[in-house]
Amino acid sequence: MSTSERFCVSDLKEERAKCDFDLEELTNLMDGGKEMTELRRQCAQKFLNDPAFTDEIPQDYLSHEDRYGNELRKACHTVRKMHKEGITIRQMASHGPRGLTLDGNPLMLHLGMFYDAIGGHGNKEQREKWLPLAENADIIGTYAQTEMGHGTFLRGLETTATYDKSTQEFIIHSPTLTATKWWPGGLGKTANFTVLMAQLYIDGKCLGPHPFLVQIRDLETHQSLPGIIVGEIGPRAGLNGNDNGFLRFEHHRIPRTNMLMKHSQVLEDGTYVKPPHAKLSYGTMVITRVSLVYHAAFQLRQAVTIATRYSAVRRQSELVPGEPEPQILDYQTQQHKIIPQIASVFALLLAAQNCGKTYVSAMSNIQEGDMELLPELHALSSGLKAIGGKDASEGVEICRLACGGHGYIASSNLPRIYGNTTCIITYEGENTVLLLQVARYLIKSFRAGRTGTPLQKSVAYLSPKSTAGEVNLKNAGLVEAFKRSVSAMVAETEGRLRRLCDSGLNYHHAWNRCSVSLVKCAEAHNRYYICDQFVKNVESLKTSLGVRNILKDLCRLYLIYHITLEEGMFLKAGVLSPGDIKVLEEEMTELLGRLRHQAVNIVDSFDIDDKLLHSTIGAWDGNVYQRLYDEAMKSPLNKTDVPKAYHKYLKPLINAKL
């Protein structure tokens, strides 16, 4: 082992020797308790020690078809192992290991949205029939909503489901090219069923989009059924082991009973039974969006683990002339890149946990006919999904850049993590569209508050009757500064919107004229919510002193970091002064220096096994350079000293000039 290699290994040992908090306690906190940590580890060991999850050839050297085949192999092995070990889909989603498939899971939507959509939209009889088939992998499904021409705008979907009373069937049809279903994971070559969103037509009347369970491939031959054209859409920026697909229908018929009828129904004679509430079906999408926040936090956890460990073993330049090269984590600029991303992991997790609790409460009320929390839940989940996806994507890219050239190499796994993260910004609700929906809730709440109507908890600060706290530089004071700044921004934007309407401009055009400001309002509101939840959770958690100090520093850093990023908002609202910002910036440098000494230990508490991290530069042992070299030697180009391409292209070029 070279001197540099010994430095790498010893550097991480020295970092871990500095740990001044209970690492296991922090792991338990992130998992949701000691019992959940034990369940996660027990579940993980059943998979991680299985050689079937080891790739014989690195993914990057496989063809497109072989990459899909390899990930499908691992995905199918996962399902077989789940059956053998008695692990249900719900249990796997809750505490199963993430990262068994490296570049997308062809069965991800089967195990997620397909199963959840049947559970959330199917009636009792349909759930009893179809869920066991999905659980046992007797049928493999996906969820087809997005079309080539329409995504987030659900009312614009063009695929039709026309009811034929004479046969008691729905005729599924794609009337235009843009009606082609486009993007669903697992659709291209894997799934034989799909939950399909299509416009329901009865007697020539469109009743809006509804979910239908549609078989698309033969269960024996896997051939696409008559009237169905299905395939894969081609390479993407990431997740290329998945088979994202397209789907078209040519007057394909399905039984009436294949419309999922938990909320609305079509009777045999064509009578349409409306749902008791138009937005009852929101529940499935809400929990999906909350799960995406967890997914975003996990991706950021991976990236910041890699970047932190690498920064603790990489030595660069001379901080002091003539002295040994320091760890790059000692540079304040590196700390400013990485440590706020560690804080973001905790902020997103805690906010998602709280939103999940709101979901459970709301669903309980909805079952009893109380829809009061539904708009609040929709706004919370939409906003968190948007901010979580944005923060994680930007954070992963910051971590990649912080690792220099080695962060650009595929074996670092950072490029792949970025590709697996940035898609969150688009799917299950494009971020800008979701933020405008949040903004609509804010404006509506602001106006309701002015009439004396009680507001829901997350927007109560928009009421003129809300109790204002004191703005100071303590945590509660900074949260109050966020609250007042957002309130001022919403008030200003609502006033502008009202004036445009008063001038004679159509409301929808006025809304568009204010849309940039409205998005900023939504982003600021969600940032306030995340900060508020972070502070409240840290203050209420019963932990040891060491863990409490770590969480307090991370929380404090998160607040100050985001205030300094958006300082103009606070200065404009007059809630903080330039002097306040200066004091906070100085405190941030102190926090970075203090957290630097625990950074490796904090990311160690994320408890991500090397077999799931898949990184040459972020492995537990810190042996970066040997791992990089060993991985480079796996390149097919290194099988021969002189490649075939030399003889075919380069040699003739050189000889022509001799």
Image (cartoon, grey):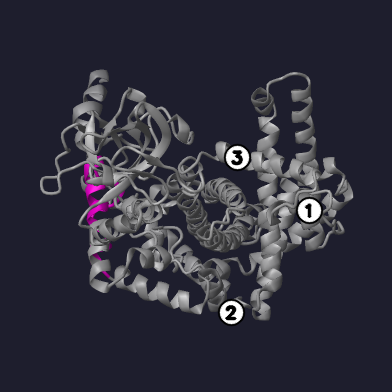
Segment tinted magenta in the rendering: 50-74
Q: Earlier in the sequence, mark 3 or mark 1?
A: 3
Residue 532 vs residue 340, the one in the foreground: 532
Quadrant location of the N terminus in the rendered image = bottom left
Question: CA gap, disc 3 to disc 1?
Answer: 33 Å
Residue contact between numbered discs 3 and 1, judged by CB atoms under 8 Å: no
Image disc number at residue 22: 2
Distance, label 3 to label 2, CA atoms, is 42 Å
Q: Nearer the viewer, mark 3 or mark 2?
A: 3
Answer left or right for 641 relative to 113: left
| Amino acid marked by disc 3 | Gln
Question: Residue 19: percent from the left, percent from the top?
Answer: 60, 76
Depth check, mark 3 against mark 1: the one in front is 3
Question: Eyeballing the image, is 512 above or below 601?
Answer: above
Q: Residues within 10 Å of mark 3 (few under 14, many from 20)?
A: some
Q: Main secondary structure of the magenta part?
A: helix
Question: Is 209 situated above or below 326?
Answer: above
Please give left or right for residue 292 compared with residue 495 in the image. left
| Label 1 – label 2 distance at C-alpha | 29 Å
Circle 2 crowding by C-alpha within 10 Å: few under 14, some 14–19, many from 20: some
- The amino acid type found where label 1 is placed reads Glu
At label 2, the amino acid type is Asp
The local crowd at label 1, few if under 14, some if 14 to 19, many if 20 or more residues have their Cα within 10 Å, is some
Q: Which residue is mark 1?
A: 585
Secondary structure of the residue carrying tag 2 is: loop
